[in-house]
Amino acid sequence: MELRHLRYFTAVVQWKGYREASRHLYVAQPSISQAVADLESELRIRLFSREGRVAILTPEGKVFYEEALKTLAQAERSIATAQRAAKGEFGKLGIAFMGFTACPFLPDLMRKYKTRHPGVALRLIEDVPNGQDAAFDRGEIDIAFTRPLPADRRASYETRLLFSEPLVAALPRDRNVKTKRIRIADLAGERFIVFQRTSSPAVFDTIIRVCNDNGFSPKLQNELNNMNSVLATVEAGEGVAIIPASSRNLRADNVAFYRLQPDDVRIDFVAAWQKKEPSVPLKLFLELLEKELPSIREKTRFR
């Protein structure tokens, strides 16, 4: 049974005969007759009792007619819903982000997306890169704003570089350092507060490499899971930190930030999504992201 059969059948009822149904549907009368015959054969009931040229519904035909109308109406609703979904008029989109790094651009990006697609429900998750990986695995998110992916994930994801940022040194403000830049080698004797590796391997490994390239292995005092905690521990005088420059977006009144010397290392910040056919909401979000990329890079310039 096809929707075509139901449409032909209901047309015969509505137009009180095969000839009129044929005229209004622009379908040859034999095709309509055959469709109704096929229905009767499949259902094993008679739908019409024919009196001259008038097609009169049998009692069981009346019951089937009411149900056929419901089926066709539901089919029309399904078609309309699918067409609206194809236009991005509704749906769901899960977004994971690192707050202090994404805050210069993400609110405006989401505002523009919601203006264009108000029917799409956004689910937001703020988490460290490792937590975002787990959210992908649970199917909770469609896109993440994150650090470069670990090697075991790169083959399964698409990424778009948003910007690269320098590293800065974070010291307690009461140290009263007079220069604007700090030589990395001068931090060799300090105790280091670091963002733990399990949370963000890319950041941790970069910091350790920078120290090693400048002649020392950092003395790791504390390894923490939250950049606010890193800065709070620095503020408490428990050590110093080398961190991405976007960390300065966090409030830490008693922490001073200094550019490094040499200043030749950058950490990437990317958008990442799985390598599969994107949902319509994700596809539309990616199109907007690409359009807004020049603005995002301007907002995240590090001077």
Image (cartoon, grey):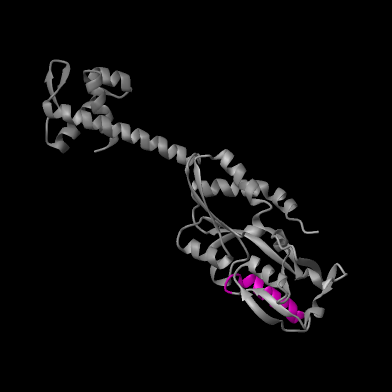
Is residue 295 visible to the viewer in this orientation of the structure? yes
Q: Main secondary structure of the magenta part?
A: helix
Tell me the magenta residue range: 198-213
Is residue 160 visible to the viewer in this orientation of the structure? no
Seen in the picture, residue 31 relative to 226 is either above or below; the reply is above
Q: Position of residue 206 (x, y in %)?
A: 69, 73
Q: Position of residue 37 (x, y in %)?
A: 17, 31
Residue 76 lies in quadrant: top left
Q: Position of residue 191 (x, y in %)?
A: 72, 80
Residue 23 lies in quadrant: top left
Q: How many marks?
A: 0
- Nearest the eye: 21 or 202: 202
At 58% from the left edge and 39% from the top edge, which residue is drawn? 115
- Nearest the eye: 229 or 286: 229
- Quadrant containing the C terminus is bottom right
Residue 50 lies in quadrant: top left
At 73% from the left edge and 51% from the top edge, which residue is drawn? 299
Q: Position of residue 172 (x, y in %)?
A: 76, 71
Q: Is residue 215 toward the left or the right of residue 39 in the image?
A: right
- Quadrant containing the N terminus is top left
101 within the magenta span: no
At 21% from the left edge and 18% from the top edge, which residue is drawn? 16
- Nearest the eye: 6 or 34: 6
At 30% from the left edge and 24% from the top edge, which residue is drawn? 27
